[in-house]
Image: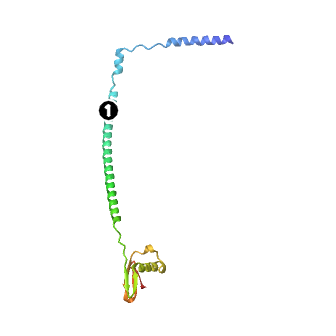
Amino acid sequence: MKNETKKTVTAQTAKAAPVKEAVKPAAPVSAKEDKVVEEKTPALKTAEKVVEKVAAKTAEVVAKTEKAAAKTEKAAEKAVVKTEKAVKTAVKKTTAAAKKTIVKEQVYLQYLGKEISKDDIMKQVKEIWTKQLKKKAAEMKSVTIYLKPEENAAYYVINEEETGKIAL
């Protein structure tokens, strides 16, 4: 078997020798051939011009986009400043309104030795509204009260619809 392997190896080596001879180093390029490679074809020149035009237009579009973005940013900043001013003004007005002193009112009717307060009459009107008429207190929008001490009565009008009489 060893002899057969040696024969195969020598046969393969013999085949490789002509291949090595066939591969030769490239010949140097002459100056004339070099000039031919450097010359540009008309198609290549046209392609370069097109690329230059596209690059110029792209630069213009980028510049316009940057200007538009700057304008938008400035407008947004102005809007924010206006909103902040409006909020500050609203806060000042609300604070000023809250600081106003709330006057506590108390009204009493004194007649023939009796004394009745406005709060007592309002309490009775609210009771009538919620318990007798079975309506919600939130539905009561306005109340008008007429006092008639000579009749020993107070007349009421709720939401300009419901009327009634309360004994003093």
Number of labels in the image equals 1
Q: Residue at x 44, y 73 (%)?
A: 138
Q: Where is the N terminus found, in terms of image quarters?
A: top right
Q: Please identify the quarter of the rendering in which residue 8 is found.
A: top right
87 and 32: which is toward the camera: 87
The kind of secondary structure element at disc 1 is: helix
50 and 104: which is toward the camera: 104
Q: Residue at x 33, y 37 (%)?
A: 58
14 and 139: which is toward the camera: 139
Q: Position of residue 125 (x, y in %)?
A: 43, 80
Mark 1: few/some/many CA within 10 Å (<14, 14-19, 20+): few
Residue where numbered disc 1 is placed:
52
Q: Residue furthest front?
A: 113
Q: Position of residue 126 (x, y in %)?
A: 44, 78
71 and 39: which is toward the camera: 71
Picture layout, residue 108 above or below residue 99:
below
Q: Please identify the quarter of the rendering in which residue 87 is found.
A: bottom left
Picture layout, residue 4 above or below residue 63:
above
